[in-house]
């Protein structure tokens, strides 16, 4: 299944012309940027014109102020000149000259304007002519003033009115132009307000046409799709992002319509697969439960054959068990298999028929589907005739052979017989292989359980034989010797020897009887309740009745309980220790102490005569010790024996 990137557009690959249109279209971003650029340019132009008009108005106002100052300075200059003439003030001449310089500077400023502050005379023809007239009058006035200052005698009074009238006329012209500029500013401001309103309306309309209306169409179409109408389509509109989105939506609805058209078939197919998978899982569960509860090989094979026939819908099932070399296949169980076929094929050789196969080296066989057909056999006249096999004579057309493989070993084969042609899917093959593996595992488990039971019986028989040999067998051997001595004494007529031997025989018979009763008591005591303390109390109680001795049990059980098989071996070791006390210790008191922490320890102590554990065995005592050591080794425990003239202590420690 090909993999795709999560950022890739699935509709981009389905429409090869989309990328070309994307490079040539007027995108939504470009449209919005264009509209914004137009309105921004108009706004900047309006603001620039407003600033320019405002600057001109401010410059004209400053010019009016400067002209007014010129008029004021001319009057002051006339007053100072009169003071100079009438009062002969020395400083009046300096004031007049200062005023001349100031007026000349103001007029020069009006001609060249100012870059430091908004001061500018309107650049119209009438204003320019009036400025020239003012300068001409100023020249005449300045010459007259300088002449009067230079004359030794006072002359006629200086007349500044013609100059002032020209200045007033210039002020009137500038004010007229200022009024025009002010009206122009108001007009620009009104135009800017109208432009803002129109821009807002245009932006709203453009947003509705370019964005809101396509989005509304998409939303309406999406609502139809949510209702299950996959025939809904959206008009692509302009070649922008929303148009591309509309095209993608249309392709999506087309795909949904196609998918929905085959959805029922897909759902039915998926449901069928899920049902088949559920059936397989149920079959696996049923077979697993059955094989786990089977008690013997025959019931396991018969039950599995019955269940396998129902699961595989076969007409008959046979289960064959193979030998180690896979040379022969024995019929273990069958279901619905014809009686004559089962009797004739109780044991078949590998290669004689379709059933049975020999695995290749290192390769285990797999499930085979074998069509059953007659074999051609040549006749004497050069013709061939078809010879039917027994399974074909019974009406079977197909054989499915499922090997029983377990850990690289071929244990046998499960055979399914069909009266029609059969083909197996991979799921069926996997199911049959899994079922066969469950059967093989269950067979192997039963075999291992049987081996364990056989080993346990053999081990117990060995211990029983050792105990019989160490007790009853030796007593019987002693009685046999005494019988020989008795015959000799009777032949000699030695009554004293006869009485002595009869006493020995009587003692030996009583000893053998006690040994037999002790063995019977030992093997009857079990830990069926899982309580070691109860079994030990029962053993000690029977020991007291049999030996006539006093016994004490101290039991401290606050640890993890011992397993059942370990408890049995511990019980036998304690019983053997008590038997040795009864036979050889000559004790009057026995102490049994059980401690669970830090390790399990069982101590058996008596106050008898003791013995040397390291000495060579003079009697059955040391043989009993060897039996106890064997039992301790079986459960992974350590057996320690300490003995002196004060008594003997046996300690069993769990590792």
Image: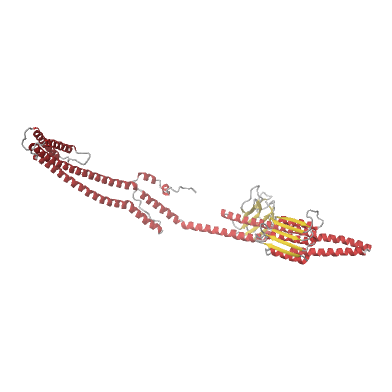
Q: In the displayed image of the protein, which residue is found farthest to the bottom?
A: 545
Count of marks, rendered view: 0
Direction from residue 490 to residue 66 in the image, left or right: left
Does 51 sit above or below residue 404? above
The quarter of the displayed image where residue 594 is located: bottom right
Please name whichever residue, 182 or 264, is drawn nearer the observer in this view of the structure.
182
Where residue 280 appears, as percent x and y from the top left, is 57, 58
Q: Residue at x 73, y 55 (%)?
A: 640
> Is residue 504 visible from the viewing direction of this image?
yes
- What scheme was used to colour the molecule? secondary structure
Q: Report the front residue among 480 and 222.
A: 480
Q: Decide if residue 285 is on the left or right side of residue 512.
A: left
Where residue 293 appears, as percent x and y from the top left, is: 64, 61
Residue 376 location (% of width, % of height): 65, 51
Residue nearest the viewer, comparing 77 with 638:
77
Can residue 372 be seen here? The reply is no
Figure quadrant of the C terminus: bottom right
Q: Position of residue 18 (x, y in %)?
A: 39, 46
């Amino acid at each position: 299944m090909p993999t795709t990137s999560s950022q890739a557009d699935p509709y981009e690959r389905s429409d090869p012309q989309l990328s070309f249109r994307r490079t040539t279209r007027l995108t939504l971003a470009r449209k919005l940027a264009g509209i914004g650029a137009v309105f921004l340019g108009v706004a900047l132009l309006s603001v620039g014109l407003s600033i320019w008009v405002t600057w001109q108005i401010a410059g004209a106002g400053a010019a009016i102020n400067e002209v007014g100052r010129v008029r004021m300075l001319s009057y002051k200059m006339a007053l100072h000149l009169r003071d100079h003439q009438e009062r002969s003030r020395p400083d009046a001449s300096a004031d007049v000259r200062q005023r001349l310089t100031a007026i000349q500077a103001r007029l020069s400023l009006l001609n060249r304007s100012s870059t430091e502050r908004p001061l500018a005379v309107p650049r119209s023809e009438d204003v320019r002519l009036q400025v020239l007239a003012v300068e001409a009058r100023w020249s005449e006035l300045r010459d007259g003033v300088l002449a009067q200052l230079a004359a030794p005698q006072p002359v006629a009074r200086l007349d500044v009115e013609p100059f002032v009238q020209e200045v007033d006329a210039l002020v009137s012209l500038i004010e007229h132009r200022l009024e025009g500029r002010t009206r122009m500013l108001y007009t620009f401001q009104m135009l800017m307000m109208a432009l803002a309103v129109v821009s807002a309306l245009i932006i709203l309309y453009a947003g509705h046409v370019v964005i809101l209306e396509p989005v509304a169409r998409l939303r309406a179409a999406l609502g139809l799709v949510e209702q299950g109408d996959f025939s809904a389509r959206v008009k692509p509109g302009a070649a922008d992002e929303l148009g591309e989105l509309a095209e993608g939506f249309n392709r999506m609805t087309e795909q949904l319509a196609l998918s929905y058209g085959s959805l029922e078939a897909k759902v039915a197919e998926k449901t069928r697969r899920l049902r088949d998978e559920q059936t397989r899982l149920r079959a696996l569960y049923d077979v697993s439960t059955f094989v786990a509860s089977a008690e013997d090989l025959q019931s396991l094979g018969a039950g599995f054959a019955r269940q396998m026939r129902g699961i595989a819908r076969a007409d008959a099932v046979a289960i064959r068990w193979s030998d180690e070399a896979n040379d022969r296949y024995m019929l273990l169980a069958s279901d619905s298999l014809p009686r004559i076929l089962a009797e004739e094929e109780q044991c078949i050789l590998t290669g004689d028929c379709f059933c049975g196969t020999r695995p290749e080296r290192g390769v285990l066989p797999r499930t085979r589907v074998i069509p059953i057909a007659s074999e051609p056999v040549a006749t004497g006249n050069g013709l061939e005739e078809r010879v039917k096999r027994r399974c074909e004579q019974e009406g079977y057309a197909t054989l499915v052979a499922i090997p029983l493989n377990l850990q690289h070993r071929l244990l046998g084969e499960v055979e399914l017989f069909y009266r029609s042609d059969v083909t197996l899917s991979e799921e069926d093959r996997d199911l049959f292989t899994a079922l066969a593996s469950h059967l093989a595992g269950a067979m192997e488990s039963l075999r291992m359980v049987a081996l364990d039971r056989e080993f346990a019986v053999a081990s117990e028989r060995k211990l029983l034989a050792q105990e019989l040999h160490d007790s009853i067998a030796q007593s019987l051997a002693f009685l046999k010797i005494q019988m020989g001595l008795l015959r000799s004494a009777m032949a000699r007529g030695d009554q004293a020897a006869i009485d002595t031997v009869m006493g020995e025989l009587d003692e030996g018979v009583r000893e053998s009887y006690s040994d037999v009763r002790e063995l019977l008591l030992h093997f009857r005591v079990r830990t069926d309740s899982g309580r070691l303390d109860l079994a030990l109390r029962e053993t000690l109680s029977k020991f007291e009745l049999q030996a006539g001795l006093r016994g004490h049990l101290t039991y401290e059980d606050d640890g993890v309980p011992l397993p059942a098989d370990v408890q049995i071996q511990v019980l036998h070791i304690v019983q053997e220790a008590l038997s040795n006390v009864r036979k050889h210790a000559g004790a009057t008191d026995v102490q049994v102490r059980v401690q669970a922490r830090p390790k399990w320890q069982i101590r058996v102590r008596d106050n008898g005569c003791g013995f040397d554990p390291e000495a060579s065995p003079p009697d059955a005592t040391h043989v009993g010790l060897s039996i106890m050591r064997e039992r301790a080794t079986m459960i992974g425990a350590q057996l320690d024996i300490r003995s002196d003239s004060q008594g003997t202590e046996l300690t069993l420690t769990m590792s």
